[in-house]
Image (cartoon, rainbow, N blue to C red):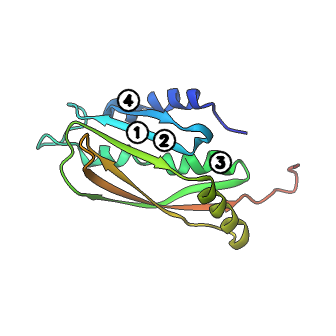
Amino acid sequence: MKLFSPRRLLHLISFYPPYLGAGIRVSHIGEGYRTFVVRMKLSFFNRNYVGTHFGGSLYSMCDPFYMLILIENLGRGYEVWDKSASIRFRRPGRGTVTARFHLSEEEIEEIRQTADREGKAEPRLSVDVVDEQGEVVAQVEKLLHVRKKERRPNESS
């Protein structure tokens, strides 16, 4: 069972204060919650001293989406946490930038099987933030921690 419908999740994320202020918008949630497309236009609120996208806003637009994909697809029986992240800036970001997050059913199943077999999975996932010409502005790498939730004695199936 999904926690939110795609439409409801889209509205919740759109009104999340850090995203609202930075102009970050989720433009698409793919069927099965396996794909998210996120955009950010350059504005007064997310530009840095030299007039390009502020690095913190570039990272912020990439922060929760792999975690959301796994939470929605693995279900309530698994815990998913961000463990670490890094961002590498490749070129100044101007105009509208876009990041596309996607995990295939096979990738999600591999993460599930690893967590079940080894007690945890720590997938390392990356995404490119691209400008309107398709040039890479930044590369973000996330290390997630996934494990099966322990059942408490009073919980039923």
Residue receiving disc 2: 36
Q: Sequence-wise, which precedes: disc 2 or disc 4?
A: 4
The part of the image, by quadrant, that contains residue 85 is bottom left
The residue that appears at 59% across and 38% down in the rendered structure is 31
Q: Sequence-wise, which precedes: disc 1 or disc 3?
A: 1
Residue receiving disc 3: 73
Whether the residues at callouts 1 and 2 have beta carbons within 8 Å, the answer is yes
Whether the residues at callouts 1 and 3 have beta carbons within 8 Å, the answer is no
The part of the image, by quadrant, that contains residue 40 is top left
The part of the image, by quadrant, that contains residue 54 is top left
**Mark linked to residue 38:** 1
Per the model, the C-alpha gap separating discs 3 and 2 is 13 Å
Per the model, the C-alpha gap separating discs 1 and 3 is 19 Å
Per the model, the C-alpha gap separating discs 3 and 4 is 26 Å
Q: Residues within 10 Å of mark 4 (few under 14, many from 20)?
A: few
Name the one closer to the observer, 140 or 104.
104
Camera-side mark, 3 or 4? 3
Per the model, the C-alpha gap separating discs 1 and 2 is 6 Å
